[in-house]
Structure formats: C-alpha cells, structure tokens
Image (cartoon, rainbow, N blue to C red):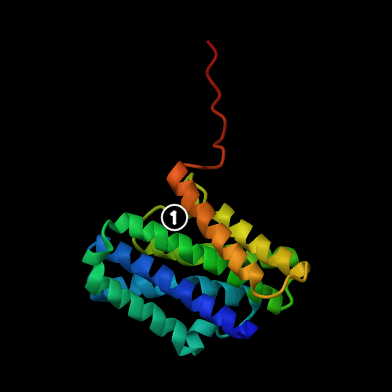
Amino acid sequence: MEEAAVLTTLDLVGTAAFAASGASIGVFKRLDLFGVCVVGVTTGIGGGITRDVLLGVHPPTALVQWPDFVVALAFSLGVFLLHPLLGHVQTAVLWLDALGMGVFATTGAATALRHDAEWWAAILIGAITAIGGGVLRDVLVNEMPLLLHRDLYATPALVGATIVVGFELGSVPYPWGLVTGTVIATVLRLAALARGWNLPSPPQWGRTS
C-alpha cells in the first residue's frame, strides 16, 4: 500500500474512533440526534483540522474532502442508534479515545514530516493532533478535558509521535513507524487507565507550628 494510502486509512480509523467516543458522550449526556452528531463529528475531525491549521493547510483537508466528514457522521449516527450494544458508555469512550489518540499521534507526526516540519515540531504537532479532538469533545459537553486528568494522556501521544519521527530519521521501512507508534501509544494509554499510572503532582508542604 502506498504511503499516502496508509496515512489516509489510519486517519479515517482515528476519525471513526474519536467520532464514536464523542457520540457516546453525547448519548450519555442525553443530547438529541443533532447534538450527538455535532459532538461526534467535531471530535472526529477536530484533531485533523487543528493539525492542518498548524501546518498551513488551508482550507483543512476535512473541510474539502468528503471521507472524513462522512465517516465521522456515519459513526456518530451508528452510536446514536446502537448505543445499547456498547455496554458501559464510560468504558467504551475511554477505549475509543485511546485508539483515536494513538492513531492521530502517529499520523499527525507523519503528516508534519511530509510538510517538511522539523523533527521536534512534528512530535508536537502529532501530540496536538492526538489531543485536539478529545479536548473539543469535553469542552462541548462541559467536562474537564482528559488532558487535564492525572492519568497519562498527552504523554502516550508524545511517545507515539516520537516513535514515528525516530523511525523516519532512522530510515526504517514505511509504515513500521506508524504501526509501532500507534500500538505503543494506545497500549500505554490503556495500561495507564488500568493501573492508575500518572505523572507526579505538586508536592504538598506541611504547616509548621
């Protein structure tokens, strides 16, 4: 499969996962059909739009090519109609969010490299792409963004993006960087949720009497 086709396919997978997570939250918040679709579509394409704005791609790809929007809308409608089959909504959201985060972290970094971004910029753009849709979702439904929770969220995205950049700089055959980075970022996020891994909090200084 050609490089562009791999990126496009993974982008659509990430769009579908994020759209489903956004729509699931919309269902949980008991929004109507329109509200569920707005949250789902915004979550699905939000990260890609943010990436394209940072890279100077105008208008953003998701707004000029139909597959991203249609996939996001289709999965949002699917969740609205079939949400009883998803089981526990919060668990479904976290799993879908982890997958979307892993995919967008790697495709965001790879896309940045294709636009001649420096390696450090590609890592940052990959991470921002990964967290952008989720942040928009949480803001729309008035929830604290997962990015600000104690458990690891941005860190797995940075790890996935760094792996892609490292593989590219090391001339590892394509698309091993994308596959490896996506799997590791997703698994790291899920492991952090399962085991309660988090970054250190500020130290608490006791009062002296």
Please provide percent x and percent y for residue 91.
34, 55
Quarter of the N terminus within the rendering: bottom right
Please provide percent x and percent y for residue 178.
61, 70
Q: Secondary structure at mark 1?
A: loop
Furthest residue in direction top, as rendered = 209
Residue 167 appearing in the image: yes
Q: Residue at x 49, y 89 (%)?
A: 65
Q: How many marks?
A: 1
Please provide percent x and percent y for residue 6.
58, 80
Residue 135 appearing in the image: no
Left or right of 113 in this view: 18? left
For residue 111, above or below residue 158:
below
Tag 1 residue = 145
Furthest residue in direction right, as rendered = 170
Q: Residue at x 61, y 61 (%)?
A: 160
Quadrant of residue 205 within the rendered picture: top right
For residue 203, above or below residue 110:
above
Of the residues shown, which amino acid type is indicated by label 1?
Pro
Left or right of 173 in this view: 95? left
Please provide percent x and percent y for residue 46.
47, 72
